[in-house]
Image (cartoon, grey):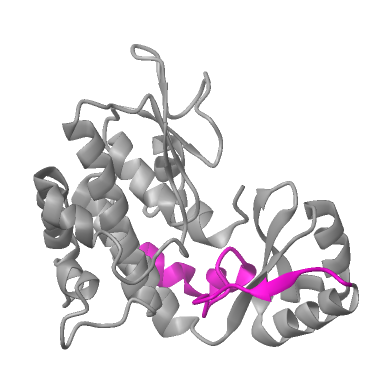
Amino acid sequence: MLVFPGQGSQWPGMALELLDSSTAFRDALADCDAALGECVDWSVLDVLHERPGAPSMQRLDVVQPLLFAVMVALARTWQAAGITPAAVVGHSQGEVAAACVAGALSLSDAARIICLRSRTMQEELSGLGAMASVARPQEWVAERLGRWGDRLSVAAVNGPTSVVVSGEAAAVDEFLADAEEAGVRARRVKGAIAAGHSAQVELVEERVRAELAPVSPEPVRSRSSRRSPARRATGPGWTPTTGIATCVSRCDSMPPYGSCWRAGTGSSSR
């Protein structure tokens, strides 16, 4: 199984050693760069090498496409070495990469999704919200959030005692102060300049629907799941002849943009 994480796994200098040592990775990253180039005016390679004039990977509309390219290229490198995943798992933006590697989305469509979703959030939601990581169980966090009503919500459950809260920036600050007073370890999520996985995402739904209208799922190769192991299933997305349950059901169930936007950005993630 290959696991594709959400935003936050980036660091300066990432992927450079592999670019120098692996032809398979270098070629795969070039393919991703070309696909992303249909939607952006910068190069993945320029950003990774921090070349003059390249945008900063601290930008939301840069780091998400950058991570997508690295994740897909890594998966292709494993495949070139003869390792084919029986399943793929995607968390948040990683769901798009997982769908691509599974074959539910073409590289072109996946690149379009990751570029346009991050650009939309950068342009229309930047500064309106924030996210915070809390070292407490979901039940504790959910009960604590009650006083803020719909201003805050649980964005992600990353583990038994690792929860992410998302919502209005001021409300997140208030929550952090409350957590500190209660002796609970909590901090803002670095680089989260928009309230992903919150109700704020609905503000850009119309634009996203229009811009992702050309996206359509494809026949799949691997099992794929959103933060859950692949399992036998029935209904949309189940391929009886191969026994493959895929996220194509989510990508196809809410056309034209599917849950690769909604589940990957607008709802809580587990």
Vertical comparison of 249 with 251: above or below? above
Region in magenta: 183-209
Tell me which corner region of the image, top left, top right, bottom left or bottom right, holds residue 80: top left
Residue at x 31% of width, y 51% of height: 71
Tell me which residue sits at (31%, 82%) in the image: 56
In this view, the residue in front, 24 or 259, is 24
Residues 228 and 197: in front is 228
- Residue at left 53%, top 77%? 194
Between 266 and 63, the one nearer to me in the picture: 63
Image spot of residue 156 (x, y percent): 63, 56
Residue 178 is left or right of residue 46, and the answer is right
Residue 53 in picture, x, y percent from top left: 17, 88
Quarter where residue 142 is shown? bottom right
Residue 23 seen anywhere in this rendered image of the structure: yes
- Say whether residue 198 is magenta: yes
Q: Position of residue 146 (x, y in %)?
A: 87, 68
Q: Count the marks: how many?
A: 0
